[in-house]
Image (cartoon, helix red, strand yellow):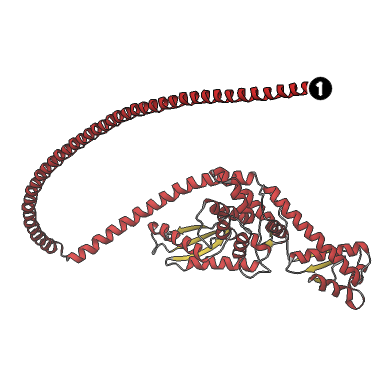
Amino acid sequence: MTPVIITIAVAILLCFAVGFFCHKAGYNHRIKIAEAELGRAEEQAQKIVEDAKKEAEDKKRVALVEAKEEILKSKNEAEREFKDRRNEINRQERRLQQKEENLDKKTESLEKKDELLNKKLKAAENQQAELEELRKQETEILERLSGLTAEEAKEYLLRNIESEVRHEAAIMIKEIEAQTKDEADKKAKNIIGAAIQRCAADHVAETTVSVVSLPNDEMKGRIIGREGRNIRALETLTGIDLIIDDTPEAVILSGFDPIRREVARVALEKLITDGRIHPARIEEMVERAKKEVDQTIKQEGEQATFETGVHGLHPELVKLLGKLRFRTSYGQNVLKHSIEVSHLAGIMAGELGADVTLAKRAGLLHDIGKAVDHEVEGSHISIGVDLAKKFHESKDVIHAIEAHHGDVEPTTMIACLVQAADAISAARPGARRENIETYIKRLQKLEEIANSFNGVNNSYAIQAGREIRIMVKPEQVGDDDMAFIAREICKKIESDLEYPGQIKVNVIRETRTTDFAK
């Protein structure tokens, strides 16, 4: 066993020795290979560096060539531009030199003309002096022959010329007026005729009283109540006076506020229908009537905007329009009047090529101030302007409201159309009615204005104040003066008198010759 083990041990040692020598030989071989590869890599790197240097030198030479070419090109362009500018300067110098030569020639020519003019002026002054002397001699001869001085002759000529000029001016005024009236009447009739034909609005005469019918006279006592408590409660809650007189089966509600009057009317009709009339029931019915009237106001405003096609109004403006349903002016319902003005203004704007929507809007809102003029101080125009500004209406609408009665000169076509439409609606026969005292005062004032002019004998207001006939004194007023008197009277009426529509002024001159056969 021992020799075997020894043999194995020796074999193992030999294997280890052989392996060690083999490993060292392989290690040396790998080192040699690595050194060979490193040498090749260094050679390749050296070659790459040399190639890079060559390429860099080539690019450098190319860049230098290109730079030289670019410099040469820029130099050539600069030289060419400099040459062009020098040529242009030379041309301008030649042109300026020519102009200087021309100016010198013109200066010489003007100096010669100036000398010639001075000579002519001296000659003209001499001739003028001679003419003045001749004129003086001629004037002296004419004065001796005519027996008139120069001033007297001048006054005589001026009188004759003034008479001729007045005559020609009167004829010209008549011709211009006739031509203007023909053209204006034709266009106005077409526009107004089309507007009126396409616009129809119902008008209801409204006053400061409302009448409530009763089923019987016994109801009057129930309305009055014990010791008048019912009527006092109704008057206190509504602010309206109840007039219970001998009128059969009727009670009159009197008050200047049309909305309060409407509330009182609705509440009273509900009480009469219900039959239970006492202060508590009256208070309940008045509250219901207020809500009902508010709803009616809103509906009327919306209906007006729908009828005219005006949209986008502020809700408060719509309510104010509804309030106009219960407001009247000279017996004309203001809401119906506003709707009519809106239609008329829109139709005329369409005929003239203006903004129809804007014209309708301005026409509908032109009297909006009347909805609250009994609550706010100021004229309905100023109130309407403030309301339009408050609810952000356009400048054209505000100006139309401000100018529709002529308080402000209209500067836009829309304002002129609204002013014309308002006058048409107000002046239409039957649209309005006047208080008899106001009517008589207006007629008297009309005649006073006519009688205040020199040469007027008598004047007569006819056709319900829409025409005035003026009789002049024939010995003081000639035919040529009549046109001037008519024009001055028209201006005076326009400035001093307020009236609906227009007034026709007729000036009549009559010459009579009377003789007797004996």
Q: Quadrant of the N terminus?
A: top right
Q: Nearer the viewer, residue 100 or 309?
A: 100
Residue farthest along the bottom direction in this orientation: 227
- The percent coordinates of residue 81 (x first, y second) are 23, 35
Q: Nearer the viewer, residue 506 or 32?
A: 32
Q: Nearer the viewer, residue 305 or 133?
A: 305
Left or right: 126 in relation to 88: left
Q: Secondary structure at mark 1?
A: loop
Residue at horizontal 73 percent and vertical 61 percent from the top: 326
Q: Quadrant of the C terminus?
A: bottom left
Asked where in the image residue 96 lies, by quadrant, the reply is top left
- The percent coordinates of residue 98 (x first, y second) are 12, 40
Residue at horizontal 64 percent and vertical 54 percent from the top: 364
For mark 1, does the 10 Å Cα neighbourhood hold few (<14), some (14 to 19), or many (20 or more) residues? few
Can residue 211 be seen in this snapshot?
no
Left or right: 476 in relation to 505: left
Residue with the mark numbered 1: 1
- The percent coordinates of residue 480 (x first, y second) are 38, 57
Asked where in the image residue 79 lies, by quadrant, the reply is top left
- The percent coordinates of residue 150 (x first, y second) are 17, 64
Residue at horizontal 50 percent and vertical 67 percent from the top: 449
Asked if residue 442 is positioned above or below residue 79 in the image, the reply reads: below
Can residue 13 be seen in this snapshot?
yes
